[in-house]
Amino acid sequence: MAKRFRIDSTLVRIAFVVAAVIGGFGFIAYLAAWLVMPMEGQTRSIGARAVRDRHGMLLSLAFLPALIAVLIVGAGLHLGFVTSMAWPVFIGAAALVLLWRNTDAEERAWLRAAAEPVVHFGSPSRRQRRWFVLRIVAGLVVFAVGVAVLLSLQQPHPATTVRPIGGVLLVVVAIVVLFGPWWLRLLRDLIAERQARTRAEERADMAARVHDSVLQTLAMIQRSAEQPQKVVQLARAQERELRAWLFDGDLPGTAADGATSLAAAVQSIALEVEAVHEVAVDVVTVGDCPLDDRLHALLGATREATVNAAKWSAASTVSLYAEVEPARASVFVRDRGRGFDPDAVADDRRGIAESIQARMVRQGGRAILRTALGEGTEVELRMPRKKDR
Amino acid sequence: MTGPGASPAGRPRVFLVDDHHLFRAGVRAELGGTVEVVGEADEVAAAVDMIVERRPDVVLLDVHFPDGGGQAVIEAVRKETPDVRFLALSVSDAPEDVIAVIRAGARGYVTKAISGPDLVDAVHRVAAGDAVFSPRLAGFVLDAFAGMPAPPDAPTTVDPELDQLSSREREVLRLIARGYTYKEVAKELSIATKTVESHVSAVLRKLQLSTRHQLTYWATERRLV
């Protein structure tokens, strides 16, 4: 539908929800729009199809007696709210029937997924079905009793305080019995989804770490294939680091050497890069603070950016500037080397995208790359700081 | 990246003070023909005598050497000839050394790792009356002035301006700390190189005139961290 207005579908929905909350008309308008407008790739709208559906019409008319019954009972018992609610419920139910019969496969799958736990009849297990029927019956009975208790208040009985409370409780219990499993399932889905996302993030984090350590080392080994001594040294160092990670849980590529403050960790990164890559790393730090997860990510990205500068820029010096402010920590890694064209980096070289940018973004920070051929490179890393507890 | 060379003679007259003979020879070679080296010394007393006598434009001096180091030289010379300018050149990164030599009156501080052309540039700048901040000095200054309000018991006669950096000065120092040259700083901030120089000179003045105790306190404290 949003396609027609050329705006985002979420926006359209939000607008309609707001309208619905304010007047109720918005909801009707949304439904109307859904009914009248053809979906992409379909010539006839849902509404047009529904109108042609005689059988569906009859089905929805079947709700009419129920509506009348409710209206009569409501009027007889002077329950204004029952009457006022009956109409919308009736119209809603009838509309649902028509829509269901005329939605396309995709929409139907979506509706079914949303409604399945309530209408469990599609479930293959017999026992489940019996249990479901039992639940519905029990729920309806309790609901009826609750409503009856509430209704009896309308009679000229001496009202006690126990009765209305009991009635309300019964109704609530009934609703829980009827819909409880559905809610539970929604909750479970939500939790499962969140876990899946966490796992995906962990995997990305691990990929970044492997890139930092193992892939970097492999690249170094290829470049120094002529020097067996150096290859052995690199391989041994990598093996040690990998073992420490796998068996002792020490994270590679993060604050090396057990440094506990940002300034110290930045210094140790500089020393390490100087030792391995034979360039000078000028470190300037302003302020300092203890490390946490976010700053570990910042350091990981810093290390990656520094190693990149040392390996690829061909500059003899890399400038590393770290500043801790009350609200954030920033690191700048700068070289005056050959620079590069960021668009020309092959897609499978994940260093900048994964180990620097994604890693910063995952923790709420950001990374900005400034470079051009022949003009050196500067990587700017900014990470907001957690509030002191 | 050659300096403006605004000194009267075109080639500034430079005096070297360092207790390492090899290092003096190295600096001499690096400065090459762009300056006139009028002498060198390896200890405080001799250096003071010769500087007062020869009146160089710029004294390039080490921070650490026996009998008080660069600080002692600056203090002694400034009593006699206040217009001699000093540029500290040191391997020491200890903030208290750097801050002490700056507060004694040096117009700048560069590390010995500085490249030849950069050193020439720095000498010319100092000769022209500008201040020279290496990235590290810029970092020190930012750190020293970072978010510390003036002490509550500070005498009210002190100009509060001296205890704070303006936001522009802060920006300039940050870029220098990140490894930008003055020219690059000017380009980045869209201001003239001369403006960058005046900001840096203003910071230097604040650094030298600020009476706050924190500055010294901070410098000594930081070494222990």
Image: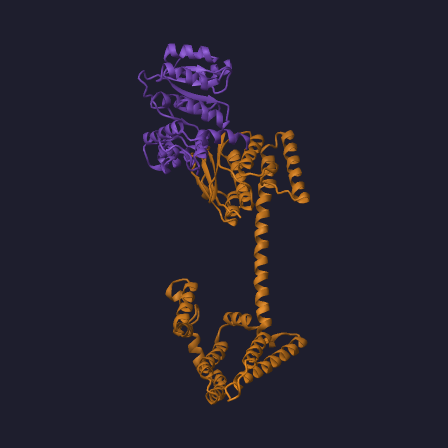
The residue that appears at 56% across and 32% down in the rendered structure is A271
Reply above or below: A84 against A350. below
Residue B33 appearing in the image: no
Lateral position of residue A293 relative to residue B207, left or right? right
Q: Colour of chain A?
A: orange
Quadrant of residue B47 in the image? top left
At a point 55% along the width and 35% down the height, the residue shown is: A264
- Residue B156 in sight: yes
Q: Residue A259: x percent and y percent?
A: 59, 37
Q: Position of residue A128 (x, y in %)?
A: 65, 75
Q: Quadrant of the N terminus of chain B?
A: top left
Residue B207 or A264: which is nearer the viewer? Answer: B207
Q: Is residue A135 left or right of residue A344?
A: right
In this picture, is B176 found above or below B88? Answer: below
Residue in the image at 57% along x and 67% along y: A186
Instruction: In this rendered view, identify the residue nearer to me: A376 or B99.
Output: B99
- In the rendered structure, the answer to whether residue B130 lies left or right of residue A161 reads left
The mark tally for this picture is 0
